[in-house]
Image: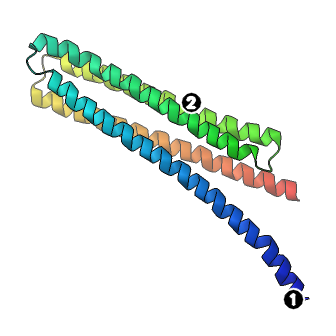
Amino acid sequence: MKINITFIAISVFIPLIAFAQQEETQYSTFLKQQKEKKETFNKNKAQEYKAFKASLAGKTPEQKSEIIKTFPNTQSEKNKTFKEELQKENSAFLENKISSSSLSNSQKAELVSFFQAQEKENRNFTDKMRNENLNAFQEIANNKNLSLERKKSAIKEQFKKQQEKTKEFSKNQNIEIEDEDEISAVESKTKSE
């Protein structure tokens, strides 16, 4: 009897372990590819910024001011496009993994919908923070009553406020996810009973 149970255990668990390792490897590979793309993108951004700074040489202050106003918007659009591309890849990976799972179609749709909603919420938050920063920086830059040191201090304060808002936003998202985990655990327990 022990031999049969051992044989059954080995024949069931070894394939499950192999499958789990394969899934983990696929996910690790995907994350590694995403990381490499981000690193390449950031290196290119750094090179563009160096070229941008070099292009300012020999320009009048008025010309520099006009050029400097357009550069952040160009960079922002490139960042947004890159993030959207990564999100599409993430969604495709997620949908591929979910489609091969044993979940019901409604559960699969619910998961995909949840992740898309989270992504949209993140994108909206990022856009909101960027707009707040641009408005604050514009206000600080145009305030002729502030010294250069006070302007630098005001910019640091703005970044600190933004950092606090970002922490709060992330904390709230984690709470939502924890709540979703609790709901899922209760639902699966109820189904098994």
- Between the C-alphas of marks 2 and 1, the distance is 54 Å
**Closest to the observer, 97 or 119:** 97
* 37 in relation to 25, above or below: above
Task: Name the secondary structure under disc 2.
Answer: helix
The tag earlier along the polypeptide, 2 or 1, is 1
**Closest to the observer, 106 or 174:** 106
Q: Residue at x 69, y 52 (%)?
A: 182
Task: Name the secondary structure under disc 1.
Answer: helix
* 46 in relation to 76, above or below: below
Quarter of the view holding residue 37: top left
Q: Amino acid at mark 2?
A: Lys
**Of all residues shown, which one is farthest toward the bottom?**
2
**Closest to the observer, 94 or 188:** 94
Dot 2 corresponds to which residue? 120
Quarter of the view holding residue 118: top right
Disc marking residue 2: 1
Image-based side of 6 in relation to 140, left or right: right
Q: Residue at x 46, y 26 (%)?
A: 81
Quarter of the view holding residue 17: bottom right
What percent of the width, then of the height, locates residue 30?
55, 48
Tell us which disc is closer to us: 2 or 1: 1
Identify the colour scheme used. Answer: rainbow
Image-based side of 71 in relation to 116, left or right: left
**Badge 2, how many Cα within 10 Å: few under 14, some, many 20+?**
few
Q: Amino acid at mark 1?
A: Lys
Q: Name the image quarter holding the N terminus.
A: bottom right
**Badge 1, how many Cα within 10 Å: few under 14, some, many 20+?**
few
What percent of the width, then of the height, locates residue 119?
56, 34
